[in-house]
Amino acid sequence: MLGPRCLFSLESPLCSDCKCRQTNQAGDNNTKFLRPHSHGACFSTITDTVLVQARDPSQLALEIENAVDERRLDDAWKAYEKHVHMDGLPRKSVLSKLITGLAESCDAHWLNQSYNVVSHAFEEKHEFLGKEPLIYLSLTLARCALPNLAINVVRKLVKMEAYPPVAAWSAIVAHMCQTSTGAFLAADLVMELGYLFQNNRVDPRKKINHPLLSMKPNSFTFNIVLTASLMFGTTRKAEQLLELMPRIGVKPEVNLLIVMARIYERNGRRDEIQKLKRHVDEAYGLSESEFRQFYDCLLSCHLKFGDLDSAVDMVLDMLRKGKNAKRSLEAAKAVLEAVENRKLYFPYGKTEAENSCSSERPISNSQMPSYVSFFKDNGFARLELEARELLKVLSDKLQEQVGLVKSEHGILHPTETMYAKLVKAFLEADKISALASFLVKASKEECPVSVERSFVVQVINACISLGLLEQAHDLLDEMRFSGIRVGSSIYSSLLKAYCKEGQHEDDITALLKDAQQAGIQLDASCYEDLIESRVSHSNTPGALHLFKELKNSNVMKSGHKEFKTLVQGSDDNEAALTTRLVEEVRSGNTVDHAVHDWNNVIHFFCKKRLMHDAHSALNKMRASGHVPNAQTFHSLITAYAAIGGKYVEVTDLWGEMKVLAGSSSMKFDQELLDSLLYCFVRGGFFLRAMEVIEMMEKSEMFIDKYKYKSLWLKYHRTLYKGTL
């Protein structure tokens, strides 16, 4: 059996993040060497004469303080080493000064050394550690992109019962959340601290609990961690945080509704978004961009589940409201022009570009405050302000990911990407009649544009570019029957495509007849292709007839410029939809809509801890031909982790996952592997844990060594007791 020494030894590659590996190893090695039984290894730089030389510990303590004040950190460290050898740890004030002095340097080496001092003192005499110096150290580590050490300092504070106020550790979390690893660890920290307050287990009426209650996560803390989780893609852990909020009595702020909606969208929880819709519509204080994000989530979920009717209704509603708003705006504009002598002014506030410029501040790169100024800020007001600015930076970055809905002066509009995804969904479902019906309704609500640039023309042209000639012809017929004008370029384009492919004589004849009845004038290049096609099929009379028609029509040789403009695009992006639709279809990204339905069913049973029903749903999912994905297994594993004791079942799921990973498109992500590792370490399945670790190392995923070492000590401290 593989023991914990292999899992948590110093040589164990538990921290496979390249940036953090050296930091963790340095921290752990130095911490070990500072223990009394290994003093010689730690202080090999000290000469033998020093080891036997009698020194006054108080003199060494004074040397440490003076060296820190004069920024002679090398001398301070040497004096500290001597003090530890001679008399153990220095007194609390000296230790605090050393920790904060090393932290103020913001140098990676000295930050590691400061963390090592804390680790050693925590094991030897944690009462020598001060609360404020540790908060300052953790903040500095977080600002200097060392989140794995920053979170460990906060964990030590909690174990010491020196509870950091929420305003202080929220600022630490805010800086951690600027990186992927830090955001992942920040979510873990909020869950660890939140579990202390579940189900009203801390009585607020008792005065002794006031320091603990000051540490309780608040809505802002959840907001920043959830936003960072969205930013870096750890949305399943974010959903666990959402489930934790009501259990600890935290009510969401208004803008947190949008973050919740985006998390539910990523995880395919359409019903949850529908529940939020009423709250969002009635909410006061939401900005234009936040409404845009919410409706982007709702549209995305409709597409994920293949609910084209709901998506079409939303798009048409946006077009209808946009058309009415534009009419009202034009009327108001005319009045203003008359009153203000054609000097128009709309108080819409700052533009998005102005807002982004004003909000971009290099907070993470700003100068770290000294410990003295930090200590004077008793209420941590400065840290709270800094954290809110960091949240604003994350929120602005997140807004850039919205791609289905755009807004102009408070009016929502579908983007070209939305149109492309919707049309692609219709084509994949082979619902040409439904697509035609949508195009007809959309063209009636569309703002006036030239015929050759209309939404309908671009969709049909995209079908032609993709080789979907039959679908393009059907759509063209539907438009003609509905009285929608499409112009001559589409007829020319479709006829040329038929000529290029050959074997479409009947279609060409029918399309030519329709063009004549509609009064469409074809361009010269189209006539040339048609004549060449007739000749290649030995249809000489037909070729002569077309030649006479070309001669009598006096069409210029240069060809149809409008069609060239439509296909190639112009400076004002006229053919954006055509290009986007062609790219979307050719990308080959198909969605198995039923997988989201099955995942929601399994997730529901897992939340209720009905694991037998969850497995029955999983079996039915497999039987119906749908392949489980990472989200399917994550729901099952987290449910087993909550129940406890079901580690054999988790092992079976692990085996199935490895088979699927080799034969399908299922990919292991950090959230899934982290939940697996938690189960295996807690259950004592160390061989399986090493398999997970190896897989995480290959993918260069960060592993929280401190968390799993603590987990092992909690459940397996006496595993090898009495075996030697």
Image (cartoon, helix red, strand yellow):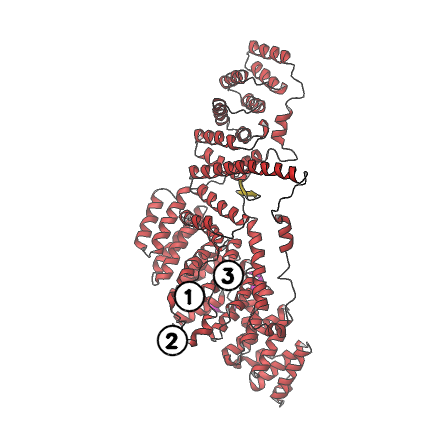
User: Whole-percent x and y of residue 218?
Assistant: 48, 63
Stretch in magenta: 7-20
User: Whole-percent x and y of residue 100?
Assistant: 60, 75
Q: Taking the image as drawn, is residue 288 in sight?
A: yes
Q: Amino acid at mark 1?
A: Tyr
User: Whole-percent x and y of residue 580?
Assistant: 56, 37
Q: Amino acid at mark 3?
A: Phe
Query: Circle 2 sits in a helix, a strand or a loop, which is it?
Result: loop
Check disc 3 and report the residue beneath it.
220
Magenta segment, prevailing SS (helix, strand or loop): loop
User: Closer to the observer: label 1 or label 2?
Assistant: 1
> Which of marks 3 and 1 precedes in the sequence?
1
Check disc 1 and report the residue beneath it.
195
Task: Relative to 356, say whether 149 is above or below.
Answer: below
Tell me what residue is drawn at x 48 percent, y 23 percent: 477
In the picture, the quarter occupied by the C terminus is: bottom left
Tell me how far mark 1 sits from mark 3, CA to CA.
17 Å
- Residue projecting furthest to the front: 339
Check disc 2 and report the residue beneath it.
721
Frontmost residue, 31 versus 293? 293
